[in-house]
Image (cartoon, rainbow, N blue to C red):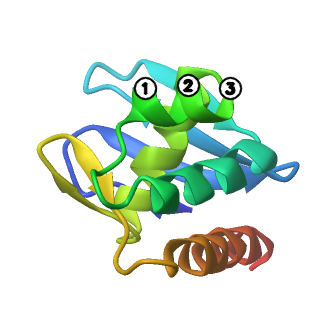
Amino acid sequence: MLASPNRFGRQFEIVDGSLHRTFTHVDGDRYYATCEFAVFQAVLSAIEDLAAEGATQRAVAKRIGAPLPQVAVAFEFLQLSGCTTYRKSRAYPPAQGKLFDLGMTVYAALAERKGS
């Protein structure tokens, strides 16, 4: 499980092949969101394609035809795992052509953690 360092508890895990985010608000309420594996892969490719201008969640959702909440889960996971950087609300890959492999490696590592 990957956890966020801020005061709101955000945790990621792989459940049935999909990326799940659990958000625990300071009052204890929990919210859940999911990103399907195929959407996660499409987000990685779209961010790489939009690397020159930076990718926004809305632009990626429109480009790949996926629901914005699923794209948001993928964006947050990629940011928290250090796969993307942000400038002016836009995501940028570490180097052109490297994000897909890096993102899939982090996804696989998270999936393996569940078994340990």
Q: Which residue ends up furthest to the right in the rendered image?
A: 16
Q: Which residue is mark 3?
A: 65
Task: Give the mark nearer the N terminus: 3 vs 1.
Answer: 1
Residue in front for this viewpoint, 54 or 7:
54
The answer to whether residue 3 is visible is no
The image shows residue 7, relative to residue 29, as above or below, that is: below
In the picture, measured across the screen, residue 55 lies left or right of residue 105, that is left
The location of residue 7, given as percent across then percent down, is 19, 42
The location of residue 113, given as percent across then percent down, is 68, 75
Local packing at callout 1 (Cα closer than 10 Å; few below 14, some 14-19, many 20+) is: some
Check whether the beta carbons of the residues at disc 2 and disc 3 lie within 8 A of each other.
yes
Q: CA distance from mark 1 to mark 2?
A: 6 Å
The image shows residue 43, relative to residue 89, as above or below, that is: below
Check whether the beta carbons of the residues at disc 1 and disc 2 lie within 8 A of each other.
yes
At 59% across and 49% down in the image, what residue appears?
Answer: 43
The quadrant the C terminus occupies is bottom right
In the picture, measured across the screen, residue 21 lies left or right of residue 16, that is left
Q: Secondary structure at mark 2?
A: helix
User: Three-letter amino acid code at disc 1?
Assistant: Arg
The image shows residue 2, relative to residue 72, as above or below, that is: below
At 25% across and 57% down in the image, what residue appears?
Answer: 5
User: Three-letter amino acid code at disc 2?
Assistant: Lys
- For residue 58, the mark is 1
